Image (tube, rainbow, N blue to C red):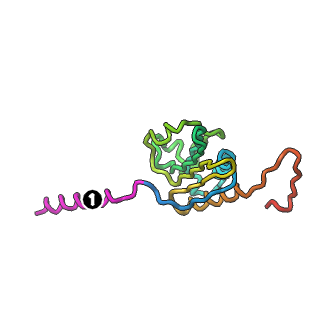
């Protein structure tokens, strides 16, 4: 009797885990007038500069796929990444952290989904649709994803300045 109950419990838990979503739900999607590489660089710099504790636990991967005109920013929780020990854990105040470099990782579209990765907190995909429009899709956790979406909106609304343009400081906060 006990074995049959244990077997039934294991079977039910296996069935429940099969119905879980494999892909995170869509949070935001919009079409923006911008260049995909410039927008991704701006968002990435703002994400890395964010000093909130929930963002300090994240490791950002900035990838560019030039053959399909796409940029991707993936945020992983460092506590779940392989190879994170006490000496380099973001929860350790004495840790020696290895921040990623400023340059994106350039990949081909063949490499886009070819390797297994740890679960992400959010995934920001920026696809160039035509000469002036990009399609921005954000999937993942709602709380930190909303902050990333605010950075997307701020970067998209930031005026582009040329070498001869004067900047009126009254409008920048």
Q: Is residue 162 magenta?
A: no
- Residue 116 x/y as whole percent: 43, 42
Residue 109 vs 159, above or below: the answer is: above
Name the residue furthest front: 130
Q: Say which of 26 and 57 sits in front.
A: 26
Q: Position of residue 68 (x, y in %)?
A: 57, 41
The quarter of the image holding the C terminus is bottom right
Say if 6 sits above or below 70 in the image: below
Q: Residue at x 55, y 63 (%)?
A: 143
Is the N terminus in the top left, top right, bottom left or bottom right quadrant?
A: bottom left
Q: Is residue 118 left or right of residue 129?
A: left
Q: What is the residue that sits farthest to the left in this orientation?
A: 1
Q: Nearer the viewer, residue 80 or 157?
A: 157
Secondary element at tag 1: helix
Q: Can residue 159 be seen in this snapshot?
A: yes
The stretch of residues the image draws in magenta is 1-22
Find residue 50 and report its image quarter: bottom right
Q: Residue under circle 1?
A: 15
């Amino acid at each position: 009797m006990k074995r049959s109950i244990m077997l039934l419990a294991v079977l039910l838990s296996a069935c429940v885990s099969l119905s879980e979503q494999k892909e995170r739900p869509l949070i935001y999607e919009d079409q923006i007038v911008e260049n995909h590489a410039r927008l991704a660089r701006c968002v990435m710099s703002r994400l890395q500069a964010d000093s909130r504790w929930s963002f300090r636990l994240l490791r950002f991967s900035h990838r560019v796929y030039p053959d399909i005109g796409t940029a991707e920013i993936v945020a992983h929780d460092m506590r779940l990444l392989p190879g994170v020990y006490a000496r380099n854990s973001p929860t350790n105040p004495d840790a020696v952290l290895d921040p990623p470099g400023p340059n994106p990782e350039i990949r081909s579209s063949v490499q886009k989904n070819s390797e297994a990765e740890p679960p992400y907190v959010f995934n920001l995909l920026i696809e160039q649709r035509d000469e002036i429009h990009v399609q921005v899709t954000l999937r993942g956790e709602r709380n930190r994803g909303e902050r990333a979406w605010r950075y997307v909106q701020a970067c998209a609304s930031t005026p582009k300045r040329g070498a001869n343009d004067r900047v009126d400081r009254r409008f920048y906060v």
